[in-house]
Image (cartoon, rainbow, N blue to C red):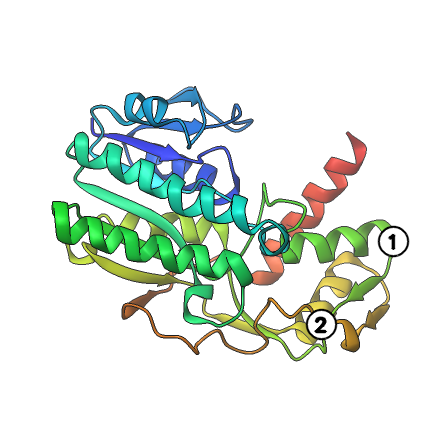
Amino acid sequence: MDKVVVIGGAGFMGSHAADELSKQGYDVTIFDQCESPWVNKDQKSIIGDIMDREAVQAAVKGSRYIYHYAGIADISEASVSPYDTINSNVMGTTIALEAAVKEKVERFVYASSMYVYSPYGSFYRASKQAAETVIEAYNQKFKLDYTLLRYGSLYGPRAQNWNGLKRFLSQIVKEGRLDYFGTGKERREYIHVFDAARLSVDILDVEHRNEAITVTGSQILNSSELIDMMFEIAGCERNVTFHNNKVVGDHYIVTPYRYVPQKGKKLVPDEFVDVGEGILDLIGEIHTENQD
């Protein structure tokens, strides 16, 4: 059984990728700074810091593949913490790459973002662009194969409180209203985390070696349409205030495609979780959290 280490496997996307890897028969080890609340009996958990070179080296020993999800992923946090963001997202990735080279890992899979195409995203985007460049350099110098996964707008169970759709739904469920900082015209290609996890394992095929893959959904909604759907599914009368003059400048509005890094392929699932169904499940999770 092939060993796979999921660095940052206690987080939102990382934990679901770890579960999908286990489902497909891989021997999964989760490496994160805290114990994953979702680790299952088929997985091993190692608590450690991505900045600890010796700990990372020990964790990836004997691995065929490494999935790297660790780092700062909240754009708001990144915009006010440039040093920590660059240190964690770029130097942390470099430490993982060093370990991958020493262990002769077959593929280094990196969780990047659609924001690499964009001038938006502040230090989060800059750190992802820089990390991709470093990964490409390791490939050129050490022949370390990689796949870059540029995720779009993810949503679903286990999402952090700052996750866009989770944040919107939480306020609707708890307060029966929504403060939206934008115009309602913003467009996103939403993809459920279950679908993203399956695609994140499918890319281990040889055809996706040394490629950048855009992982997004096929359901494109503008914010106003999404808000209507959320209120309807939550069973609440639409009550939204658009704060147009307070649009967060770090987020793109319609499309991130301004800056062009390495050319990437786009993968969307043939079968996928419908946005409405996903929203309904997420409302259930929020109600459960409120009862705890």
**142 left or right of 137 in image:** left
The residue sitting at 71% across, 53% down in the picture is: 167
Q: Is residue 87 above or below residue 183?
A: above
Mark identifier at residue 224: none
Q: Please provide percent x and percent y for residue 179.
A: 81, 64
Q: Amino acid at mark 2?
A: Val
**What residue is shown with label 1?**
175
In terms of image quadrants, where is residue 257?
A: bottom left
Q: Is residue 89 above or below residue 289?
A: below
Spatial CA distance of label 1 from label 2 is 22 Å
Q: Please provide percent x and percent y for residue 60.
A: 28, 27
The residue sitting at 80% across, 56% down in the picture is: 172
The residue sitting at 42% across, 53% down in the picture is: 196
Q: Is residue 96 above or below residue 120?
A: above
- Between 216 and 49, the residue placed more toward the observer is 49
Indicate the secondary structure of the residue bearing disc 2: loop
- The local crowd at label 1, few if under 14, some if 14 to 19, many if 20 or more residues have their Cα within 10 Å, is few
Q: Amino acid at mark 1?
A: Glu
Mark identifier at residue 247: 2
Q: Please indicate, yes or no, whether residue 178 appears anywhere in the rendered image.
A: yes
Quadrant occupied by the C terminus: top right
